[in-house]
Image (cartoon, grey):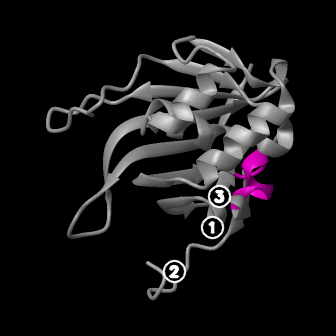
Amino acid sequence: MATFTAYVLVGHGHPNDDGIIPIAELALSENSRPAWTLRPRYEAFQQPIPPIPKQRIWIPSRSEHILEDGLLMLALLVWQDRQLRHAARELFHLQEPQLDLSALDAERIAALRQMARSKELLGKLALFVLRHSSLCNQLEKLAAWSIQAEVCTPRWWRIQNQWDAAPRIGGTLAINHNEC
């Protein structure tokens, strides 16, 4: 059974304050094969324009590109950059409910990622990454993308599975108030 190891709240930053106005959510499941699941959020106060398609699932191209393949998915399906979408249509159908990027031409997918990286994406991400997620080793790549973002990683945990007699506890709850 796959478990979710990362969650991205996708939206727009508030014009006057911190925070996020959500329009979509992107979840990373991992087990035998990672997969990104994009779902629109229809809040009573916010209707995304243009509308976000119904649920989409993308299988990343390679394990080292999981984060950037997810960001590419957002650039194409949420922010719908016209030039990027035109280039992507030469490679796959954007309306496909499930897409396996590993089955496509690796060089052309890399070129799409590079094109998306060069775009100014007018949105905001709140990225929550759990311990042992494949994204833990890829977070530095986010700096190359022009998008507002906040990244949350565990600073404290209490975890117990069926084989543990007692919970495993780690990290610290002490907060540097200059960081929060």
Q: Which residue in the structure is indicated by mark 3?
A: 157
Q: Residue at x 84, y 35 (%)?
A: 107
| Residue 132 on the magenta segment | yes
Mark before the other along the chain sequence, 2 or 3? 3
From the image, tell me which residue sits under label 1.
155
Residue at 63 percent of width and 13 percent of height: 98
* For residue 115, side relative to residue 8 (left or right): right
Mark 1 is surrounded, within 10 Å at the Cα level, by few (under 14), some (14 to 19) or many (20 or more) other residues, namely: few
Q: Amino acid at mark 1?
A: Arg
Q: Residues within 10 Å of mark 3 (few under 14, many from 20)?
A: some
- Depth order, front residue of 154/82: 82
Residue denoted by label 2? 175
Q: Amino acid at mark 2?
A: Ile
Residue 49: horizontal and vertical position, in percent? 26, 33
Could you tell me how far apart the alpha carbons at marks 2 and 3 are, in whole angstroms? 14 Å
Judged left or right of residue 160, residue 27 is: left
Q: Secondary structure at mark 1?
A: loop
Q: Secondary structure at mark 3?
A: strand
Verify whether residue 35 appears in magenta. no
Q: Quadrant of the C terminus?
A: bottom left
Task: Please tell me the numbered disc located at residue 28.
Answer: none
Between marks 3 and 1, how big is the CA–CA gap?
7 Å
Residue name at image x 49 percent, y 63 percent: 150
**Residue at the location (85% across, 23% down)?**
32
Looking at the picture, how far across and down is residue 136, in whole percent? 75, 55
Is residue 166 shown to the viewer in this render?
A: no
Asked whether the residues under the numbered discs 3 and 1 touch, taking CB atoms below 8 Å apart as contact, a structural biologist would say no
Q: Amino acid at mark 3?
A: Trp
The picture quadrant where one finds residue 54 is top left
Q: Which residues are magenta?
A: 131-139
- Do tag 2 and tag 1 residues touch (Cβ < 8 Å)? yes
- Label 2: few (<14), some (14–19) or many (≥20) C-alpha neighbours in 10 Å: few
